[in-house]
Image (spheres, grey):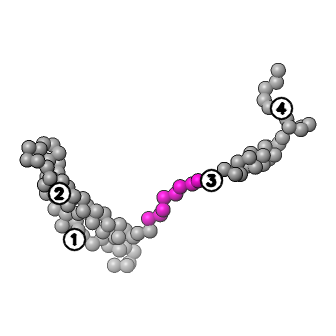
Amino acid sequence: MTNGRKPWGDHALTGAERQALYRARHAAAPMVRYRRPADRRSRPQRWRDAVAELIALQAEYAAWFEALPEATRDSATGAALEAIIELDLDDIAAITPPRGFGRD
């Protein structure tokens, strides 16, 4: 007893013929590819965006801390929120990163 598929014609298909048949069978299937868009922002712009995001998050955490009941402000969650609120982000926001490569 022989293993494998029987040839379609009087001879076995070559690799190129098998590939052509495979591509013909799968030609109707849609090809979906996802690519992340490239980040075209400069480093200074990414820095400013990151600092703005940190400041916005700190404000959200402050609002969350203010909404906590008095009984839970002494918990681990309250302590973590308070530590985030106490961070001084003004020093980070004041930094202007160099543009680099002679564009200063």
Amino acid at pointer 4:
Lys
97 or 45, nearer to the observer: 45
Q: CA distance from mark 3 to mark 4?
A: 31 Å
Depicted 65 relative to depicted 90: above or below:
above
Q: Nearer the viewer, mark 1 or mark 3?
A: 3
Q: Of the residues shown, which amino acid type is indicated by label 3?
A: Met
What is the C-alpha distance between the residues marked 1 and 2? 24 Å
Residue 103 lies in quadrant: bottom left
The numbered mark, 2 or 3, whose residue comes first in the sequence reads 3
Q: Earlier along the polypeptide chain: callout 4 or callout 1?
A: 4
Residue that extends furthest to the bottom in the rendered view of this protein: 103
**Mark 1 vs 3: CB contact within 8 A:** no
Percent coordinates x, y for residue 95 in the rendering: 24, 70
Tell me residue 30's x, y (percent).
64, 53
Give the Cα separation between the discs numbered 4 and 2.
72 Å
Kindly tell me whether residue 83 is visible in this rendering. Answer: no
Where does the magenta region start and end?
31-39
Q: Is residue 28 visible?
A: yes
Report the residue marked by disc 3.
Answer: 31
Separation (CA) of disc 1 from disc 3: 48 Å
**Magenta part, dominant SS:** loop
What residue is pinned by disc 2? 63
Kindly identify which numbered label has been placed on residue 94: 1
Q: Indicate the position of residue 4 as horizontal and vertical percent values.
A: 78, 29
Question: As drawn, is 41 to the left or to the right of 75?
Answer: right
Q: Which residue was labeled with disc 4?
A: 6
Residue in front for this viewpoint, 13 or 8: 8
Q: Give the foreground label among 1 and 2.
A: 2
Q: Amino acid at mark 1?
A: Ala
Image quadrant for the C terminus? bottom left
Does 35 lie within the magenta span? Answer: yes
